[in-house]
Amino acid sequence: MATLAEDRTGYPVHPDARPPSARGDPIGGDRYWSKDFADREWEHMWKRVWHLGGRVSQLEEPGDFIVHDFRHESVVMVRQQDGAIRAFFNVCMHRGNRLLSVSEGSVSGALTCPYHGWKWGLDGVLAQVQDPEDFPQGNPCGKLTLKELRCETWGGFIFWSFDPNAPALLDYLDPIPTLFANRDLENYTRVVWQTLRVNTNWKFASDNFNEAYHIPSVHPQFEPMIDDHYSTTLFEMYPNGHNRMIEKLQPSSRYPDAQQVKPLWASVLREWDIEPADYEGRAQEGRLALQRARRALGPARGYDHFERLTDDELTDQMHHTCFPNLTLTATPEGLHVFRTEPDAEDPNWSTFDYWYLAPPVRGMSEIPTLYGMRPFRETEHSSGEFERYQTTIAQGDFLAQDLSLAVTQQKGLRSMAFGDCYLAGQETRVRRFHEVINDYLEGRR
């Protein structure tokens, strides 16, 4: 992996980063609702990329497992006796029954098929069958194995791939691991885990997180403290199809009162012993003051990880869209993880995962999240239908705001009136995302 340099903005960037550009491939509505298009994505893209399957922390002891269902397939990741993690198709090679029907758990030494009791070792080798002498081919134990998949880890995340010839995970993710080098993600704890089934195509999330153009309309609550204007935002794209966008933590430059200290920004400054009144009329300068304060006060307050972060990482929101369906938004306090996956049968539906991971803070047993204070421990999984999702977030629930628009956009994309997106320059990464999909579907990747 290459080392980081600095561009004219002062942000650390990867040498392969380049400004967003696109060929101009049209983005037709049928990409979002056509069963034929979804089948092509499955055949030419989903079978070749790396998939986020879970967290290493879910697999503490030999026999601990995670099941990840993706479309009609099911994959089990299991901790081995030697500590390694391996992934297998969750299907018995006897008569095709699913071995496991729960999302995670633990087994004692073997994966047992509930149909005929065949036992498969943690290494995937068949260990025990009923009536082994009755097989004309001879005793199948020690001969048959579960179908294994590629499985690798990075940052405490477990990834797997259907493709035995997929590039190594770190090569596939490049330069994301380099960009996260200052964050000890292996030791972050998942304190929020929310899964919602949404009446929209999976690509909505990647589209949405590849631009900040929607923020003033959809998330106006962020205006006092997140600068969403394209003139102050860093946009990058990388050869592997991944992208990055960095927004400064300061009042938005798109408004005439950008230098006015509003209550939300004042509360952020005050939390770090900065007097908001000192920055009235020059509110954006509070960002640099906040960097200095966090640098000076952070370790004494238990934020040991601040010492590893750059000044920009101490304030700014760094959004990484990892092709095709994973977004990692890093802040000084933690990591927001978004994963969207297609429905098994209907391209008009998808599942939307939101995780919030936080580093340890000395003396803190609870962690502030968008959902309020949460215990600093691995959380339980919460899931349901978006239409029944209800929560209260003081700053406004950005998930509900985004997903509500996803549902209405999915309806509009079906209209015969829609032929292509008419994009602003700051939305270029949206078109580029679709062009990378096209590259997979048309054999260029």
Image: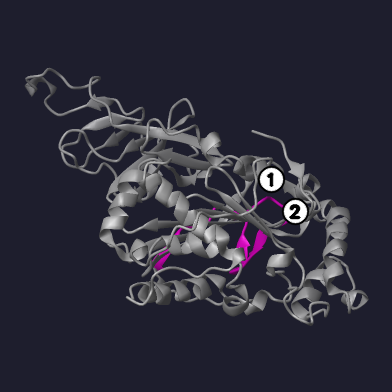
The relative height of residue 394 versus residue 361 in the rendered view (above or below) is: below
Image quadrant in which the C terminus is located: top left
Figure check: 30 above or below 53? below
For the point 28% across and 31% down, the residue is: 146
Say what amino acid the circle numbered 1 marks: Arg
Q: Which residue is mark 2?
A: 313
Q: Which residues are magenta?
A: 357-384
Q: Position of residue 219 (x, y in %)?
A: 60, 76
**Could you tell whether 41 is left or right of 364 in the image?**
left
**Residue 328, x across and y down, in percent:** 58, 53
Depth check: 113 or 254 in front? 254
Q: Position of residue 229 (x, y in %)?
A: 69, 70
Secondary structure beneath label 2: helix
Mark 2 Cα within 10 Å, few/some/many (few <14, many 20+)? many
Residue projecting furthest to the front = 23
Q: For the residue carrying disc 1, how many other residues have a C-alpha within 10 Å: few (<14), some (14-19), or many (20+)?
A: many
Residue 183 is labelled as 1
Image side of residue 442 versus residue 120, left or right: right
Residue 271 lies in quadrant? bottom right
